[in-house]
Image (cartoon, rainbow, N blue to C red):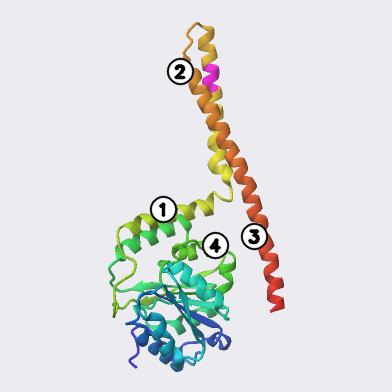
């Protein structure tokens, strides 16, 4: 097998002995029947060359072809292999969560089924973990169709969330336990690194070569996905910055409007004393005061919900070590 560009030979990679088995490669697959045989073949060859014995979990995400059947047949060459099936196409985030939920390993490798990344990148990710990272992301190298869209998204994310990596939506490896702390909604696999970094997990990055898709067509296409991505980015920004301090979003504007209503009210009284009553000004006072009080109440309720969320998170952190000690 020819050595892929940018991939070090086995002797040059220092992989911790326990990591050689303590990882699971989760492969979301939707209508990838044409790619599965070659994919599992090169994964098995990579495991052999680098003396790896990790799990391989193919998640058939509601495919309309024979993806699952072919995967079950071709996966026989792997020591630790299983296929999961979704009855409907749920999405990459759900496929990732399903695969991670059944994995017995502490580390998860998210790997696409289209073979645009070489499986020989997997040992490079494992070797990078020896530097103490909790997550290692792959930064795509090479030309690809959505490069400008991906570039804009990644620049926005680095600017808004201060994430220390250049590519958030690519092949990656991470601690499975991170999924216990963050909630991934539909399509939020793109923000996994952002949410984990906000929790204090250490993030690293390596360059990985992007190869042309060999069979089939890309599954994520269309201009509508750009709008959805922007709305999701705003949602994540709101969750990280304002859900913890709702008073910043609701309380401050509420107090400002209430104070402005008071000032307008004083002006209205003074004008009335001098015989220049102006009815619309009184209506404005009522509007400002009512909206200001409403916003402040929203902020107060938001603070109560944020406190409950903090208590739940703390309870999860206390339960996690106890659960680990029992296993």
Instruction: Point out residue 80 in the picture as x, y percentages from the top left corner.
Output: 51, 88
Quadrant of the image containing the C terminus: bottom right
Dot 4: few (<14), some (14–19), or many (≥20) neighbours within 10 Å?
few
Question: Which residue is at a point 40% across and 84% down the rendered structure image?
Answer: 69
Few, some or many C-alpha atoms within 10 Å of disc 1 (few <14, some 14-19, many ≥20)? few
Q: Position of residue 277 (x, y in %)?
A: 48, 10
What residue is at 31 percent from the left and 66 percent from the top?
A: 147
**Mark 4 or mark 1, which has the lower sequence index?**
4
Q: Report helix, strand or loop for mark 3.
A: helix
Give me the C-alpha separation between circle 1 and circle 3: 26 Å
Judged from the image, the secondary structure of the residue bearing numbered disc 4 is loop
Query: Above or below — where is 88 with respect to 266?
Result: below
Vertical side of 294 occupied by 7: above or below: below
Residue 309 visible within the image = yes
From mark 4 to mark 1, how far is it between C-alphas?
A: 17 Å
Question: Which residue does the numbered mark 3 point to in the structure image?
Answer: 313
Closer to the chain start, of discs 2 and 1, is 1
In the displayed orientation, state which residue is furthest to the top. Answer: 275
Q: Which residues are magenta?
A: 263-267
Q: Quick one: SS at disc 1? A: helix
- Contact, mark 4 vs mark 1 (Cβ under 8 Å): no
For label 2, the SS is helix
* Label drawn at residue 231: 1
Instruction: Please state the horizontal and vertical placement of residue 305, each as a whole percent of the image.
Output: 62, 49
- Residue found at x 51% / y 63%: 184
**Does the residue at mark 3 contact the one at mark 4 (Cβ under 8 Å)?**
no
Side (left or right) of 140 relative to 101: left
Point out the tag, 3 or 2, that comes first from the N-terminus. 2
Give the CA separation, mark 2 to mark 1. Answer: 38 Å
| Image-quadrant location for residue 262 | top right
């Amino acid at each position: 097998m020819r050595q892929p560009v940018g991939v070090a030979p086995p002797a040059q990679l220092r992989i911790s002995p326990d990591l050689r088995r303590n990882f699971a490669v989760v492969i979301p697959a939707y209508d990838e029947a044409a790619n599965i045989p070659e994919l599992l073949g090169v994964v098995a060859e990579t495991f052999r060359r680098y003396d790896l014995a990790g799990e391989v979990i193919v998640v058939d995400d509601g495919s309309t072809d024979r993806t699952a059947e072919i995967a079950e047949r071709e996966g026989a060459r792997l020591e630790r292999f299983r296929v999961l099936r979704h009855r409907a196409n749920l999405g990459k985030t759900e496929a990732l969560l399903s695969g991670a939920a059944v994995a017995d390993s502490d580390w998860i490798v998210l790997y696409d089924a289209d073979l645009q990344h070489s499986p020989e990148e997997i040992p490079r990710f494992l070797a990078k973990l020896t530097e103490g990272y909790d997550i290692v992301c792959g930064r795509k190298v090479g030309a690809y169709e959505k490069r400008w869209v991906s570039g804009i998204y990644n620049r926005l994310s680095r600017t808004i969330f201060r994430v220390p990596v250049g590519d958030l939506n690519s092949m990656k490896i991470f601690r499975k336990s991170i999924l216990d702390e963050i909630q991934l909604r539909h399509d939020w696999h793109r923000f996994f690194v952002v949410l984990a970094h906000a929790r204090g997990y250490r993030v690293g990055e390596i360059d990985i070569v992007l190869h042309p898709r060999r069979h089939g067509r890309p599954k994520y296409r269309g201009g509508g996905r750009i709008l959805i991505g922007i709305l999701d980015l705003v949602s994540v920004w709101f969750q990280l910055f304002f859900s913890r301090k709702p008073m910043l979003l609701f309380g401050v504007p509420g107090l400002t409007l209430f104070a402005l209503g008071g000032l307008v009210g004083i002006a209205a009284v003074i004008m009335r004393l001098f015989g220049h009553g102006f009815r619309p000004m009184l209506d404005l006072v009522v509007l400002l005061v009512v909206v200001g009080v409403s916003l402040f109440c929203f902020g107060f309720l938001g603070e109560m919900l944020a406190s409950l969320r903090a208590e739940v998170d703390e309870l999860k952190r206390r339960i996690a070590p106890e659960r680990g000690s029992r296993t």
